[in-house]
Amino acid sequence: MSDITPQSSTAEQDVLLDHDYDGIQEYDNPMPGWWLAIFYVTIVWSIFYMVALGLDFIDGYDAQLAQASRQLETTRNAFAAATPPVDEAMLSALLDDADALARGAEVYAGTCAPCHGANHEGGVGPVLTDEEWIHGGTLPEIYATIRDGVPENGMPPWGPVLRQEDVAALTAYITSLQ
């Protein structure tokens, strides 16, 4: 059996590197032009960015965070000003509002029924149709219980999940059950 070695042209010899590793020779291929262009643009951009950041032409992280915090505070204040406060008079008025009671029934079916029962009979959570209330039975107390929850007893706070109007409608609905 004869040892067959491939014959290489002189063009291949020009791009082959001189070293040999376990019989494998390596070509000297240059990086593609588009790749080098992106690499050099990245270097130029990083130099520009660092200089602009150092000279305050570009806001740094702390300035962006402060600006975003101001915008958030403005949005919160506008929301608080547009949202009426929940008090006993407002909750009492919802007891006579059929639309609010219907909305409260919808919210109850989606959030409360799994624990308090579809017919308000209790289960994991307490019964809602009797006169005994563990955390207070007045309208503001029921509203606060729904909004803030009772984590030590397994009831999640629904205030961060539901809109204020939905919590108020749910309070009116639950109170109407008695």
Image: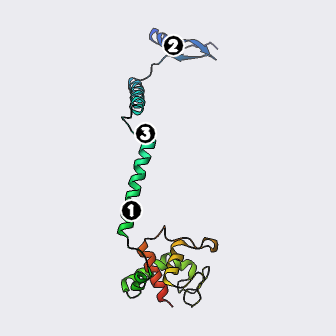
Name the disc covering residue 60, or none: 3
Camera-side mark, 2 or 1? 1
- Residue 172 picture quarter: bottom left
Q: Which type of secondary structure does the marked residue at label 3 adopt? A: loop
Residue at 53%, 83% (x, y): give it. 118
Q: Residue at x 37, y 65 (%)?
A: 79
The three-letter code of the residue at mark 3 reads: Gly
User: Which kind of residue does numbered mark 1 sit on?
Assistant: Asn
Q: Residue at x 49, y 89 (%)?
A: 177
Residue at which label 2 appears: 16
Residue 50, position as x, y percentages in the image:
43, 30
Query: Is residue 71 placed above or below 93 in the rendered structure?
Result: above
The span from disc 2 to disc 1 (Cα, nearest Å) is: 70 Å
Q: Which of marks 1 and 3 precedes in the sequence? A: 3
Separation (CA) of disc 3 from disc 1: 26 Å
Q: In the figure, 81 relative to 9: above or below?
A: below
User: Is residue 19 left or right of 166 when viewed as pictured?
Assistant: right
Q: For mark 1, what is the residue? A: 77
Relative to 125, is 62 above or below?
Answer: above
3 vs 1, front mark: 1
Q: Earlier in the sequence, mark 3 or mark 2?
A: 2
Q: In the image, residue 157 lies at what x, y percent?
A: 54, 70
Task: Report how far apart the C-alphas of labels 3 and 2 lie in the structure.
Answer: 49 Å
Residue placed most toward the observer, 98 or 56: 56
Left or right of 168 on screen, residue 57: left
